Image: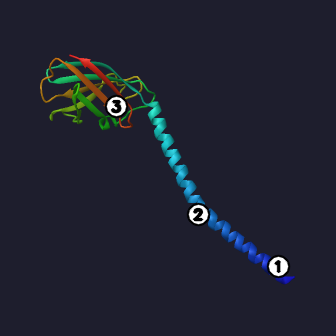
Amino acid sequence: MAESVITVSIITIACVICATMLVSAIYPAVNRATSSVVSSSAKLGDRIETSVDIIAEANESSYEYVWVKNIGSQIVSSQIENSDIFFGEIGNFQRIPFNATLLATPSWNYSIENDDGNDRWDAGETINITISSASEITAGDYYVKIVLYNGVSDEEKFSI
C-alpha cells in the first residue's frame, strides 16, 4: 500500500513538472504574439484615423505653396517634419528635404494656417507648405505628393 502511494506521488510530481515546463515554453511565445498583434493594431488604427487632402497650390518665382488639410480624426503633432514631400515637373520630380529656414534649396517648411494655439496639426486645420526650389518655377505640368510619418499620403498634378 505504501508503495502505491509513493508511486502515485512520484507520477503526480512528474506531471506537475511537465506541465510547468510546457507552460514555461508556450507562455513567452503567446505573449510575443499578443504583443505583435496589439502593436500592429495600434499602427493600423493610427493610419485609419489619419487622412490629408491637398486643397490648393500656388507659386511665386522659385517658391511653390501647397495647402494641405487634415481631414482625419488624428492629431498630427510634431511629426510633420518627418513627412516626405515630392515636387517637380511631371516625370522629373524629386524628394524635397525639410529645412525650417529654407536656406538650403531645394527644401520645404510649413506653417499651420488656422492653428488654435497648440502648435499641433489638429483635425480640420490646414498647413501651408512652402517649397523653395533651386531654380525658378516656370510654366508646365507639376506634381506634388505629401507622405506623412505613418504612410498616409495625397498627391496632385497641376499646371502653372
Mark earlier in primary sequence (2, 1): 1
Mark 3 or mark 1, whichever is nearer to me: 1
Q: Which residue is mark 1?
A: 5
**Quadrant of the rendered image containing residue 105:** top left
How dense is the environment of label 2, judged by Cα within 10 Å: few (below 14), some, or many (20 and up)? few
Given the current orientation, which residue lies at the most extreme front position? 91
Q: Which residue is mark 2?
A: 25
Q: How far across and how far down the image is residue 34, in percent?
A: 55, 50
Given the current orientation, which residue lies at the most extreme right position? 1
Q: Is residue 122 left or right of residue 99?
A: right
Q: Residue at x 30, y 28 (%)?
A: 145
Given the current orientation, which residue lies at the most extreme left position? 135
User: Regarding mark 3 in the picture, which secondary structure is present there?
Assistant: loop
Disc sitting over residue 119 in the figure: 3
Q: CA distance from mark 3 to mark 1?
A: 74 Å
Q: Residue at x 54, y 51 (%)?
A: 33
Q: CA distance from mark 2 to mark 3?
A: 48 Å
